[in-house]
Amino acid sequence: MPKEWDPTSDRVMQFNNGSDGIVTLPKVFKCLIDTPEFQRLRGIKQLGSALLVFPNADHCRFVHSLGTASLAFQFMMELRKQTYDGKKLVKGNDILAVSLAALCHDLGHGPFSHMYEEVFLTDVHQRHETLSIKLFEKIFVDNPDVKKAFDEYFDENTYKLVCQLIDPPNYCKTDQEWPLLVEREKAFIFGIVSNSLNGLDVDKLDYLIRDSERSGIPVSINKNVVQLLFESAQIVKHPIHDFTWIAFPDKYTGNVKNIFEARKRLHEELYNHRVIIAIAEMLKHALQCAGDDLEILGSNNNPIKLKNCSNDLNAYLKLKDSVVDFIANSFSTEPKMLQAKMILKNIELRKFPRVVAKLDYLKETDNNAFEKEVRNEILQLGIIDNSKLVTVMKVFHFGKGYHNPIVDVLFYVRNSDALVRHAEDTNCYRTCLFVFAHDNCSDDDARSIYEKLVSFAQKKGLQPPTKLYT
């Protein structure tokens, strides 16, 4: 029978994580952190190719995972002090399970974080969250010492709960059997790691603060604000759904809005910086070209094609950002591999596609059809080949598309049982199309493309395009 982890007597580990300060985690986590499955995250950049534009943004998934786990641990330790219906809901093993899910939530990321996923994981059953769960389970199969350490506290149901916390099922449908592995009164723990109800979770809090600090792009959120939210959070009955959730003081509404606005700002200015978009498109093209020819050693020493590595976990574990070095230094003379090598060489020489313009439009429309229409307009000029024209559609919002997630965050009023839900601000969604030409596109051709976009925007009743070429 597993025992209950005791936060007051069981050991914790502390270490200095740079700008994070002192990170505190349960001591039992150390053996899992030391496994190859987790250490692999040191070789995967948090922001993909962003360090080629923001030189200090070279942090990895490893430090983000530690930071996320530390925030989850802090939050759960605060919620442990709370009572609901006269009883304490948070037990020691709940703290372990939620913190462990936070630690392992990104195990499934491939090279350059989301980039491998966008190129090869097109199947809905092969998202990085799904691979995170598979690798989490693999840790306990391949590392008996880790399984033994956690078996002291976990039964099989708790291991399954960690997997659910990493990738939660839909628990808001009223016409289905209750899908969670906890009772309805403990559903609030699903708002900690991967909050599908409103997106306000420790994963987002960690990456927003960390990415802002490392890139130098300021946002109106910091560790002090996060600590205030943690310390003031309460467990409440959700006013719409038949389960418990987390509420924050109404006076911190502005702070919570700042979190969602920070997400939108970083997507606009960092994650989708125009040069980062250009580099990402080149890297994705290089991975696609190498997908059939580059082979990785998989299970039973079988060679696995790069594009199929997600189907073989032993091969997938070998994939890090360094895969581009394997491509660049490959002996292969296959045409596609030679093309991949050329793309990587151009990145090294900083010969990126030339950004011409950005076309903003706020109308709800079919993005694919709109992009195709824009491309056809430009190609009619006859000055650029289809293969040399790069268009990339990007959407910026608070995390829930057209819906403002602040509506779904619960706030409580001091000295009152009332819960407050705030009205939606509709100005939270923006779509834009970036237009690139080949790296040696002349000023005259760039001007012609831009002028074509100006007339197109006028015809469609859209905002004039933003000129980005110099």
Image: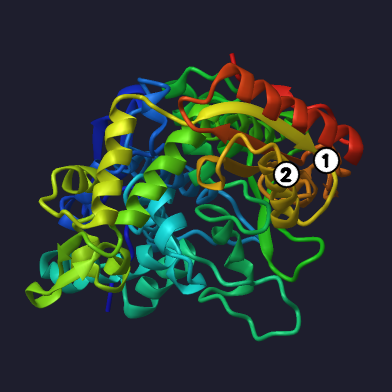
Indicate the position of residue 375 as horizontal and vertical percent values.
68, 45
Q: CA distance from mark 1 to mark 2?
A: 15 Å
Q: Nearer the viewer, residue 336 or 138?
A: 336
The type of residue carrying mark 2 is: Val
Q: Is residue 40 above or below residue 137?
A: above
Is disc 1 surrounded by few (<14), some (14 to 19) or many (20+) residues within 10 Å? few
Using the rendered image of the protein, determine whether residue 26 is visible from the camera's viewpoint. no
Rendering quarter of residue 179: bottom right
Q: Is residue 200 above or below residue 50?
A: below
Residue, disc 1: 362
Query: By what rule are the colours in the image chosen?
Result: rainbow
Mark 2, residue position:
374
In the current view of this chain or complex, which residue is farthest to the top?
A: 470
Q: Is residue 336 left or right of residue 318?
A: right
- Residue 249 locus on image (x, y percent): 73, 37
Badge nearest the viewer, 1 or 2: 2
Q: Quadrant of the C terminus?
A: top right
Where 405 sits versus 219, above or below? below
Question: Residue 84 at x, y = what percent?
Answer: 65, 59
Q: Earlier in the sequence, mark 1 or mark 2?
A: 1
Judge from the rendering whether residue 51 lies leftward or rightward of residue 460; answer left or right: left
Which of the image's four quarters has the N terminus?
Answer: bottom left
Which residue type carries mark 1?
Leu
Q: Secondary structure at mark 2?
A: helix
Q: Residue at x 37, y 27 (%)?
A: 51
Numbered tag placed on residue 254 in the rendering:
none
Q: Residue at x 30, y 61 (%)?
A: 291
Secondary structure of the residue carrying numbered label 1: loop
Residue 464 location, quadrant: top right
Q: Is residue 278 visible?
A: yes
> How many other residues sit within 10 Å of disc 2, few (<14), some (14-19) or many (≥20)?
some
Give x and y (percent) for residue 461: 92, 37
